[in-house]
Amino acid sequence: MRLVENIIGIMRGKAGTPIPGGIKPPDYKQATLRSRLMPTPIPRELILPLIQHGSTRSKPLVKPGDKVLKYQTIACSEATGIVDQHAPTSGVIRAIENFAIPSPLNKESMCILLESDGFDAEIDHNAITDYRSLSYLELAKLIEEGAIFGLGGEGYLNRLKLSSG
């Protein structure tokens, strides 16, 4: 009963007594320990929402009929903290229009429809052999261009983390 009261207090914004040891639900990993990793097939079509973080919409850099390569930038945003969007595989842009998306805010949203060509061809990469040889600004620029962002609850753009010190 004390645990329930503590949780209710936390939910109402009142500081509760810390839960000793925290809550550790079972992880059920045993069910997959004997499964082997298998390649995932490339989907025939991918619907890529242009909306990010609530209501911030990215601007498409492609148009229907354009051929794209995996990792190519296909949409960008002028808003701070919003990552550029990249093609997850190679193919042809078939449409830029409203599609139903799983979101509590919108039933439909502007999306890019990418039809896969099945080749998964990538853009050329300029591999960095020693990142320590780069200046702080050069490294931050590469991180920004690569749309690398944190995987915490908010998904903050790492460039913003780097620029804050």
Image: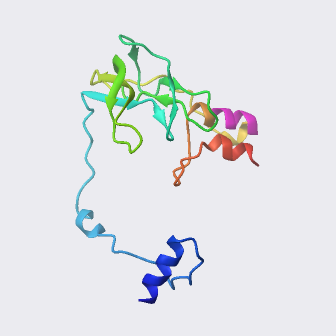
Q: Position of residue 149 (x, y in %)?
A: 56, 43
| Residue 149 to residue 83: above or below | below
Q: Residue furthest bottom?
A: 1
Side of 146 where 102 appears, left or right:
left
Determine the image quadrant of residue 159: top right
Determine the image quadrant of residue 129: top right
Quick check: can you spot residue 22?
A: no
**Depth order, front residue of 18/156:** 18
Side of 62 where 138 appears, left or right:
right
Say if the magenta span includes residue 139: yes
Side of 31 where 123 appears, left or right:
right
**Residue drawn at the location 74% of the way across and 47% of the way down:** 164
Count the marks: 0
**Depth order, front residue of 25/90:** 25
Q: Quadrant of the N terminus?
A: bottom left
Q: Position of residue 43 (x, y in %)?
A: 26, 32
Q: Position of residue 18 (x, y in %)?
A: 55, 82
What stretch of residues is rendered in magenta?
Answer: 136-142
Side of 152 where 50 appears, left or right:
left
| Residue 98 to residue 65: above or below | below
**Residue drawn at the location 60% of the way across and 77% of the way down:** 15
Q: Residue furthest top?
A: 65
Say if the magenta span includes residue 113: no
Q: Report the magenta stretch's main SS.
A: helix
| Residue 64 to residue 138: above or below | above
